[in-house]
Image: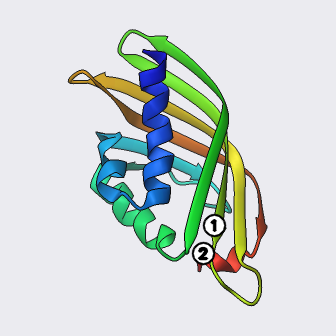
Amino acid sequence: MRQAIEDVVTKMFVFNDEHNWEGLASVFAPEVKMLHLLEGNETEHVMTPQQIVAAWRPIMEKFQSVHHQIGNMLTTIDNDNATVTCYGTSTHHKEDPRGNIWNVVGTYVFKLKQLNGEWKIVDEVFKCKYQSGNLDLVK
């Protein structure tokens, strides 16, 4: 069971990096609480999978490549609910004379729920520890 839960979290990052938008939407519950604490963005949103894709897709498609790497996963399971915490780093690459890389490093807390026999992400909190590189690449 633990592996199935952690696979959902891993798929979220892999599908994002691969621009597999249908796959990305598939890991989320019908409503997801999202909070990304990054440069003053401290507003929690309740979003559908389609809204998440619509928000992330234009950002990710600005880059020639994106690579998320996660580690130090800790998972707790309580019947049909689970929490996964992990460290994460994302490297975004785009050709630019001012610098080609934008890195973001932080921690994640995911809450998952088993819905119709499948684990789905119902809550995500990202806390940025630091950013480096050309932060203008995301603009």
Instruction: Report the mark closest to the observer, 2 or 1.
Output: 1
Q: Which quadrant would residue 53 be assigned to in this image?
A: bottom left
N-term mark: 2 or 1: 1
Where disc 1 sits, the SS reads: strand
Vertical relation: 34 (above or below) 139: above
Expressed as whole percent of the image width and height from the top left, the position of residue 32 reads: 37, 42
Q: Residue pushed farthest top?
A: 79
- Residue at (64, 78) in percent of width and height: 137
- Residue, disc 1: 92
Q: Tell me the amino acid under the disc marked 1.
A: His
The disc label shown at residue 138, or none: 2
- Residue at (59, 80) in percent of width and height: 139
Expressed as whole percent of the image width and height from the top left, the position of residue 98 reads: 77, 87
Q: Residue pushed farthest bottom?
A: 97
> In the displayed structure, does residue 88 sit left or right of residue 18?
right
- Residue at (41, 28) in percent of width and height: 112
Q: Is residue 103 visible?
A: yes
Query: Mark 1: few, some, or many residues within 10 Å (few <14, many ≥20)?
Result: many
Q: Which of 63 and 104 is in front in this view?
A: 63
Expressed as whole percent of the image width and height from the top left, the position of residue 78 reads: 44, 10
> In the displayed structure, does residue 17 sit left or right of residue 49?
right
Vertical relation: 59 (above or below) 75: below
Expressed as whole percent of the image width and height from the top left, the position of residue 56 reads: 44, 63
Vertical relation: 34 (above or below) 53: above
- Residue at (48, 17) in percent of width and height: 2
> What colour scheme governs how the chains and residues are painted in the rendered image of this protein?
rainbow
Where disc 2 sits, the SS reads: helix
Is there CB contact under 8 Å for labels 2 and 1? Answer: yes
Question: Marks 2 and 1, Cα distance to the nearest angstrom?
Answer: 9 Å
